[in-house]
Image: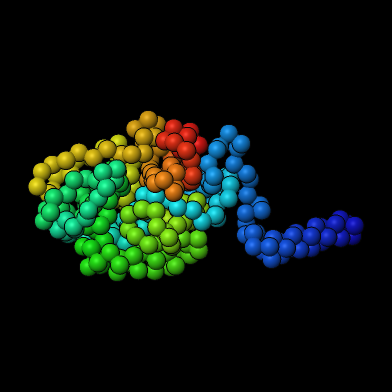
Amino acid sequence: GAGGTMGRFRRLVLGVVAAALLLGSGTPAHAAREPACPSTVGAQSAIVVEVETGTVACARKADKRLSVGSATKLMTALVTLEQAKLSDTFTAARYNALAVESMIGLQPGERMRVSDLLRGLLLESGNDAAVTLAEGVSGSRKAFVREMNRRARELDLDNTHYANPIGLDQEGNYSSARDLVTLAIHLRSNRFFRKVVDLPSATLKTGVRPRTVRNRNRLVARYPYVNGVKTGHTRGAGYVLVGSARRNGIQLVSAVLGTPSEDARDNDT
Protein backbone atom coordinates (compact mmCIF):
# COMPACT_ATOMS: atom_id res chain seq x y z
CA GLY A 1 0.00 0.00 0.00
CA ALA A 2 0.86 3.69 -0.05
CA GLY A 3 1.93 3.59 3.60
CA GLY A 4 4.35 0.73 2.92
CA THR A 5 5.73 2.54 -0.11
CA MET A 6 6.29 5.72 1.92
CA GLY A 7 7.95 3.65 4.65
CA ARG A 8 10.35 2.07 2.18
CA PHE A 9 11.08 5.48 0.63
CA ARG A 10 11.78 6.96 4.07
CA ARG A 11 14.19 4.12 4.90
CA LEU A 12 15.91 4.58 1.53
CA VAL A 13 16.36 8.33 2.12
CA LEU A 14 17.67 7.74 5.65
CA GLY A 15 20.12 5.17 4.27
CA VAL A 16 21.40 7.59 1.63
CA VAL A 17 21.76 10.36 4.22
CA ALA A 18 23.62 8.03 6.60
CA ALA A 19 25.99 6.98 3.80
CA ALA A 20 26.60 10.62 2.86
CA LEU A 21 27.34 11.50 6.49
CA LEU A 22 29.77 8.59 6.76
CA LEU A 23 31.54 9.62 3.57
CA GLY A 24 31.68 13.20 4.78
CA SER A 25 33.25 12.05 8.04
CA GLY A 26 36.03 10.22 6.21
CA THR A 27 34.67 6.76 7.09
CA PRO A 28 34.24 4.54 4.02
CA ALA A 29 30.56 3.75 3.52
CA HIS A 30 31.27 0.03 3.03
CA ALA A 31 32.98 -0.12 6.44
CA ALA A 32 29.73 0.87 8.16
CA ARG A 33 27.93 -2.13 6.63
CA GLU A 34 30.54 -4.74 7.49
CA PRO A 35 30.14 -7.06 10.48
CA ALA A 36 32.67 -6.50 13.26
CA CYS A 37 35.25 -9.20 13.89
CA PRO A 38 34.67 -11.25 17.09
CA SER A 39 36.01 -9.84 20.34
CA THR A 40 38.17 -12.98 20.67
CA VAL A 41 40.28 -11.60 17.79
CA GLY A 42 42.88 -9.33 19.35
CA ALA A 43 44.47 -7.96 16.16
CA GLN A 44 44.68 -4.20 15.82
CA SER A 45 43.28 -4.48 12.30
CA ALA A 46 41.64 -7.45 10.55
CA ILE A 47 39.41 -8.53 7.69
CA VAL A 48 38.01 -11.74 6.16
CA VAL A 49 36.75 -11.76 2.56
CA GLU A 50 34.91 -14.49 0.63
CA VAL A 51 36.68 -14.41 -2.71
CA GLU A 52 33.97 -15.39 -5.22
CA THR A 53 31.46 -12.71 -4.19
CA GLY A 54 33.75 -10.21 -2.43
CA THR A 55 31.56 -10.45 0.67
CA VAL A 56 33.28 -9.17 3.81
CA ALA A 57 32.63 -11.69 6.59
CA CYS A 58 34.08 -9.40 9.25
CA ALA A 59 36.31 -6.33 9.50
CA ARG A 60 38.05 -4.20 12.12
CA LYS A 61 39.81 -0.97 11.15
CA ALA A 62 40.44 -2.64 7.79
CA ASP A 63 41.49 0.60 6.07
CA LYS A 64 43.93 1.78 8.76
CA ARG A 65 47.43 2.40 7.40
CA LEU A 66 49.94 0.28 9.30
CA SER A 67 53.41 -1.21 8.96
CA VAL A 68 53.02 -4.71 7.54
CA GLY A 69 56.54 -6.17 7.63
CA SER A 70 57.23 -8.84 5.05
CA ALA A 71 53.65 -8.81 3.77
CA THR A 72 55.25 -6.06 1.63
CA LYS A 73 56.86 -8.92 -0.30
CA LEU A 74 53.47 -9.77 -1.84
CA MET A 75 53.91 -6.75 -4.11
CA THR A 76 57.55 -7.71 -4.71
CA ALA A 77 56.23 -11.06 -5.92
CA LEU A 78 53.54 -9.50 -8.12
CA VAL A 79 55.90 -7.12 -9.93
CA THR A 80 58.37 -9.97 -10.45
CA LEU A 81 55.73 -12.36 -11.80
CA GLU A 82 54.50 -9.69 -14.21
CA GLN A 83 57.90 -8.48 -15.45
CA ALA A 84 60.22 -11.51 -15.35
CA LYS A 85 60.10 -15.09 -16.52
CA LEU A 86 60.26 -17.90 -13.96
CA SER A 87 63.13 -19.36 -16.01
CA ASP A 88 65.21 -16.14 -15.83
CA THR A 89 68.40 -16.25 -13.75
CA PHE A 90 69.49 -13.33 -11.55
CA THR A 91 72.81 -12.65 -9.84
CA ALA A 92 72.63 -12.22 -6.05
CA ALA A 93 72.53 -8.56 -5.04
CA ARG A 94 74.95 -7.06 -2.54
CA TYR A 95 72.98 -6.88 0.70
CA ASN A 96 74.32 -6.27 4.19
CA ALA A 97 71.79 -7.86 6.51
CA LEU A 98 71.44 -7.58 10.26
CA ALA A 99 71.75 -10.84 12.21
CA VAL A 100 67.99 -10.94 12.94
CA GLU A 101 66.92 -10.67 9.30
CA SER A 102 65.39 -13.59 7.41
CA MET A 103 67.66 -14.80 4.62
CA ILE A 104 68.06 -17.70 2.20
CA GLY A 105 71.84 -17.36 2.35
CA LEU A 106 72.71 -16.10 -1.13
CA GLN A 107 76.46 -15.80 -1.72
CA PRO A 108 78.09 -12.86 -3.58
CA GLY A 109 77.89 -13.51 -7.32
CA GLU A 110 75.65 -16.56 -6.89
CA ARG A 111 73.10 -17.01 -9.66
CA MET A 112 69.62 -18.35 -8.98
CA ARG A 113 66.53 -18.87 -11.09
CA VAL A 114 63.59 -16.49 -10.53
CA SER A 115 61.30 -19.41 -9.64
CA ASP A 116 63.60 -20.38 -6.74
CA LEU A 117 64.09 -16.76 -5.65
CA LEU A 118 60.30 -16.44 -5.45
CA ARG A 119 60.05 -19.62 -3.38
CA GLY A 120 62.68 -18.22 -1.02
CA LEU A 121 60.84 -14.89 -0.93
CA LEU A 122 57.36 -16.29 -0.24
CA LEU A 123 58.20 -19.20 2.09
CA GLU A 124 61.35 -18.26 4.02
CA SER A 125 60.67 -14.52 3.51
CA GLY A 126 64.28 -14.02 2.43
CA ASN A 127 65.33 -10.38 2.38
CA ASP A 128 68.29 -11.24 0.16
CA ALA A 129 65.87 -12.85 -2.30
CA ALA A 130 63.71 -9.69 -2.28
CA VAL A 131 66.63 -7.38 -3.06
CA THR A 132 67.97 -9.73 -5.75
CA LEU A 133 64.57 -9.85 -7.45
CA ALA A 134 64.20 -6.07 -7.24
CA GLU A 135 67.58 -5.39 -8.83
CA GLY A 136 67.16 -8.20 -11.35
CA VAL A 137 63.77 -6.96 -12.54
CA SER A 138 64.31 -3.18 -12.52
CA GLY A 139 68.07 -2.65 -12.34
CA SER A 140 67.90 -0.93 -8.95
CA ARG A 141 65.86 -1.09 -5.75
CA LYS A 142 64.70 2.50 -6.26
CA ALA A 143 63.33 1.77 -9.75
CA PHE A 144 61.64 -1.40 -8.48
CA VAL A 145 59.93 0.48 -5.63
CA ARG A 146 58.55 2.92 -8.21
CA GLU A 147 57.04 -0.09 -10.03
CA MET A 148 55.58 -1.38 -6.74
CA ASN A 149 53.84 1.95 -6.14
CA ARG A 150 52.64 2.15 -9.75
CA ARG A 151 50.97 -1.26 -9.42
CA ALA A 152 49.47 -0.29 -6.06
CA ARG A 153 47.81 2.71 -7.72
CA GLU A 154 46.57 0.59 -10.64
CA LEU A 155 45.01 -1.90 -8.23
CA ASP A 156 43.36 0.95 -6.27
CA LEU A 157 45.25 0.08 -3.09
CA ASP A 158 44.49 3.50 -1.65
CA ASN A 159 46.02 2.84 1.76
CA THR A 160 49.26 1.30 0.50
CA HIS A 161 52.66 2.82 -0.26
CA TYR A 162 56.09 1.24 -0.53
CA ALA A 163 59.54 2.53 0.42
CA ASN A 164 61.45 -0.76 0.02
CA PRO A 165 60.89 -4.23 -1.51
CA ILE A 166 61.49 -6.05 1.79
CA GLY A 167 59.08 -4.68 4.37
CA LEU A 168 61.60 -3.21 6.79
CA ASP A 169 60.15 -0.45 8.98
CA GLN A 170 60.59 2.78 7.04
CA GLU A 171 58.56 5.94 6.67
CA GLY A 172 56.31 5.58 3.65
CA ASN A 173 56.12 1.79 3.79
CA TYR A 174 52.61 0.80 4.85
CA SER A 175 49.44 -0.97 3.83
CA SER A 176 46.05 -1.93 5.27
CA ALA A 177 44.28 -5.20 5.97
CA ARG A 178 41.83 -4.61 3.11
CA ASP A 179 44.56 -3.71 0.62
CA LEU A 180 46.60 -6.79 1.58
CA VAL A 181 43.61 -9.05 0.96
CA THR A 182 42.86 -7.33 -2.36
CA LEU A 183 46.49 -7.86 -3.41
CA ALA A 184 46.51 -11.49 -2.26
CA ILE A 185 43.30 -12.25 -4.18
CA HIS A 186 44.86 -10.73 -7.30
CA LEU A 187 48.03 -12.79 -6.82
CA ARG A 188 46.05 -16.00 -6.33
CA SER A 189 45.02 -15.81 -10.00
CA ASN A 190 48.62 -16.84 -10.74
CA ARG A 191 49.01 -20.63 -10.66
CA PHE A 192 52.69 -20.59 -9.63
CA PHE A 193 51.94 -18.25 -6.73
CA ARG A 194 49.00 -20.37 -5.52
CA LYS A 195 51.11 -23.52 -5.60
CA VAL A 196 54.11 -22.01 -3.76
CA VAL A 197 52.23 -20.40 -0.86
CA ASP A 198 50.46 -23.71 -0.21
CA LEU A 199 53.76 -25.58 0.37
CA PRO A 200 54.98 -26.35 3.92
CA SER A 201 58.55 -26.34 2.52
CA ALA A 202 60.46 -26.40 -0.75
CA THR A 203 63.96 -27.21 -2.02
CA LEU A 204 65.72 -24.55 -4.08
CA LYS A 205 67.74 -26.51 -6.63
CA THR A 206 69.47 -23.65 -8.48
CA GLY A 207 72.30 -21.57 -7.05
CA VAL A 208 75.61 -22.88 -5.73
CA ARG A 209 73.95 -25.58 -3.61
CA PRO A 210 70.49 -27.02 -2.92
CA ARG A 211 68.79 -25.47 0.11
CA THR A 212 65.48 -26.20 1.79
CA VAL A 213 63.22 -23.33 2.86
CA ARG A 214 60.28 -23.66 5.22
CA ASN A 215 56.99 -21.81 5.10
CA ARG A 216 56.82 -19.31 7.98
CA ASN A 217 53.02 -19.58 7.75
CA ARG A 218 52.69 -22.53 10.13
CA LEU A 219 48.95 -22.90 9.43
CA VAL A 220 49.66 -24.36 5.96
CA ALA A 221 51.28 -27.46 7.49
CA ARG A 222 48.82 -27.62 10.39
CA TYR A 223 45.48 -27.44 8.54
CA PRO A 224 44.85 -29.16 5.16
CA TYR A 225 42.34 -26.49 4.09
CA VAL A 226 44.74 -23.55 4.66
CA ASN A 227 46.40 -22.69 1.34
CA GLY A 228 48.44 -19.51 1.95
CA VAL A 229 49.54 -16.76 1.99
CA LYS A 230 52.28 -14.69 3.72
CA THR A 231 53.57 -13.74 7.16
CA GLY A 232 55.24 -10.52 8.23
CA HIS A 233 57.02 -9.26 11.34
CA THR A 234 58.99 -6.21 12.39
CA ARG A 235 59.11 -4.26 15.63
CA GLY A 236 56.88 -1.61 14.11
CA ALA A 237 54.41 -3.99 12.49
CA GLY A 238 54.13 -6.62 15.20
CA TYR A 239 53.10 -10.00 13.78
CA VAL A 240 51.11 -9.98 10.53
CA LEU A 241 49.50 -12.78 8.55
CA VAL A 242 47.66 -12.71 5.26
CA GLY A 243 45.91 -16.06 5.29
CA SER A 244 43.79 -18.05 2.87
CA ALA A 245 41.75 -21.23 3.12
CA ARG A 246 39.35 -23.28 1.02
CA ARG A 247 36.72 -25.53 2.51
CA ASN A 248 33.43 -26.88 1.14
CA GLY A 249 34.04 -24.98 -2.08
CA ILE A 250 34.39 -21.64 -0.29
CA GLN A 251 37.64 -19.67 -0.63
CA LEU A 252 38.44 -17.09 2.06
CA VAL A 253 41.34 -14.65 2.30
CA SER A 254 42.09 -12.83 5.56
CA ALA A 255 44.55 -10.41 7.10
CA VAL A 256 45.45 -9.75 10.72
CA LEU A 257 47.79 -6.86 11.55
CA GLY A 258 49.49 -5.70 14.72
CA THR A 259 49.33 -8.88 16.81
CA PRO A 260 51.83 -9.41 19.68
CA SER A 261 53.14 -12.91 18.88
CA GLU A 262 53.17 -15.74 16.35
CA ASP A 263 50.63 -17.66 18.42
CA ALA A 264 48.30 -14.64 18.62
CA ARG A 265 48.70 -14.10 14.87
CA ASP A 266 47.79 -17.72 14.14
CA ASN A 267 44.89 -17.82 16.62
CA ASP A 268 43.43 -14.58 15.24
CA THR A 269 43.68 -15.91 11.69
In percent of the image, x 21 and y 55: which residue is there? 95
Q: Position of residue 251 (x, y in %)?
A: 46, 44
Task: Quadrant for the N terminus, please.
Answer: bottom right
Classify 204 as above or below 267.
below
In percent of the image, x 44 and y 67: which residue is there? 153
Seen in the image, is 74 located left or right of residue 39? left
Classify 183 as above or below 102.
below
Q: Position of residue 214 (x, y in %)?
A: 27, 38
Q: Position of residue 117 (x, y in %)?
A: 22, 51
Q: Is residue 182 visible?
A: no
In percent of the image, x 54 and y 47: which residue is there? 45
In percent of the image, x 40 and y 61: which residue is there? 162
Q: Is residue 218 visible?
A: yes
Q: Which of 250/160 is in front?
A: 160
Q: Position of residue 91 (x, y in %)?
A: 14, 58
Residue 199, located in which quarter of the rendered image?
A: top left
Residue at the extreme top: 222
